[in-house]
Image (cartoon, rainbow, N blue to C red):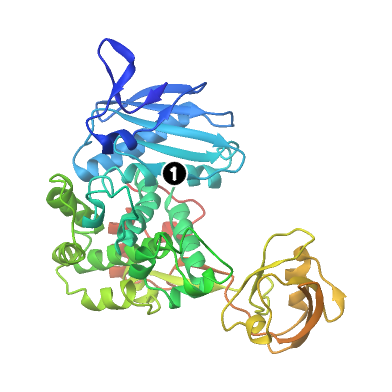
Amino acid sequence: MTTALDPLPNDPLTFLADNFDTLVDSPFEIGLHQIHDFAAGGKPHQLAVWGQGNYDSAKIVSDIQKIIAVEAAMFGGLPYDRYVFLLHLSAHGYGGLEHHNCCSLLYSRFGFRQPETYHRFVSLVAHEFFHLWNVKRIRPQALSAFDYDQENYTDLLWFCEGVTSFYDLVIPYRAGIYDAKSYLKLLSESITRLQAIPGRQVQSLSDSSFDTWIKLYRPDANSRNCQVSYYLKGEVVSLLLDLCIRQQHHNQRSLDDVMVSLWQTYGQTQQGYSREQLQSVIESVAELDLSHFWQNYIDGTVELPYAAFLDPFGLELVADGGEQPIPYLGLTLHNQTETGIVQFVDVNSPAQIAGLQPGDQLLAIDGFRVRPDQLHQRLPDYQGGARIAVTVFRDDQLKTYPVTLADPIPASYTLKPVPQPTTSQKQRFRQWLGIDLDQVTSQRSTCPS
């Protein structure tokens, strides 16, 4: 049996919780699982692993120790006496849940061998462990006293989860688990995912946060067109805030200082912060009036101005159409099986303008059958502006729609050094990530010095 609760001195199978909140926030792992004890920051920890997989427990423990060290150094120590990592391995699982003195992790049993999938795992660990401060102790007023009879609404989940998502990428880099190229690649992937969501121009971060109970975890066929994840956009906005503060203070301050200030003012005193207090702390650290930033990018849906924040650090966001640019159709199939069911149709896309809908079964283009895995192979045969006939089944009725394809849209975005960086850009980049800018373009990269 494994739990973060302490047993009674004379009864190892009886555990005591200080209050009801602690009780319901303390999961138990009961059964056959592997237990790995280790120390970090001078305190005892446990990794409890349920299930079989291709993980290396020694490597996982070592990297967890590095993550703990980085986060503890940021906040000035560890706010617990003992901590437990509960790891469940399954066929395709992914996710986590933070608790007061432990976290629950769900991951693919064979996702530990390849660097990219292993990096995803350590990012998950860093994310849930960072919640030890951000959310479990530093939290909005709406979450400072739980009402178990109803949902608890707040428009600040973008900060709770988005900032944590920002740090779950940077912390493994600071810990030396992966290098700068990998870090920038992961940031690029986050930006790519965000820019592919039409709903980013419809729903604000604050609205996304408030609506989580009724929308984020209840997606429908139109979700992509009217919603944005406060995890994902919150992460990217946090990056821009971090760069904004760094530029203003010549890398002598960062988002780290915001988190430390919140920890000292609200976390250690266990007082929830308000929306106004959060903005005040960020502005105090930045020594800037961020009303414009807040209005446009947190409460509004203005497109994020990447260049304005990246250029001072010698980076630019480069759009990539792929090796073979594909004219834009604007629909996503549910999966790559023979059924070919349309899952999403992007708002204002050629597919939507033509009348195609989620639930349609794609059959043919210009009279020739097209299987789901052939769609992206067939579209490059056309140019933007070409008119094609798309045949589908809708409610068992055969229908054909004329669709005018649009020009290709970016398939991905990549953070790259600007062609001719200035001395100040090189200096800012070096102070930010601890390596020279030209090392990002070299064949080998390094971790921060």
Residue 75 as seen in the image, left or right of residue 333: left
Residue, x 38% and y 37% (percent of image)?
103
Residue, x 60% and y 37% (percent of image)?
110
Name the outermost residue toward the top.
10
Q: Quadrant of residue 435?
A: bottom left
Q: Tell me residue 432's x, y (percent).
A: 30, 58
Residue 347 as seen in the image, left or right of residue 277: right
Q: Quadrant of residue 390?
A: bottom right
Residue 109 as seen in the image, left or right of residue 263: right
Q: Residues within 10 Å of mark 1 (few under 14, many from 20)?
A: some
Is there any visible trace of residue 435 in the rendered image? no
Asked which secondary structure carries label 1, the reply is strand
Label 1 sits on what residue type?
Answer: Gly
In the image, 319 versus 94, the foreground residue is 94
Residue, x 43% and y 49% (percent of image)?
179
In the image, 93 versus 69, the foreground residue is 93
Looking at the rendered structure, the number of numbered marks drawn on it comes to 1
Above or below — where is 63 with respect to 413?
above
In the image, 260 versus 430, the foreground residue is 260
Is there any visible trace of residue 47 in the rendered image? yes
Residue beneath disc 1? 96
Q: Tell me residue 147's x, y (percent).
A: 28, 50
Name the outermost residue toward the right.
368
Q: Tell me residue 1's x, y (percent).
A: 42, 21
Above or below — where is 124 with respect to 288?
above
Q: Tell me residue 304's x, y (percent).
A: 38, 75
Name the outermost residue toward the front.
149
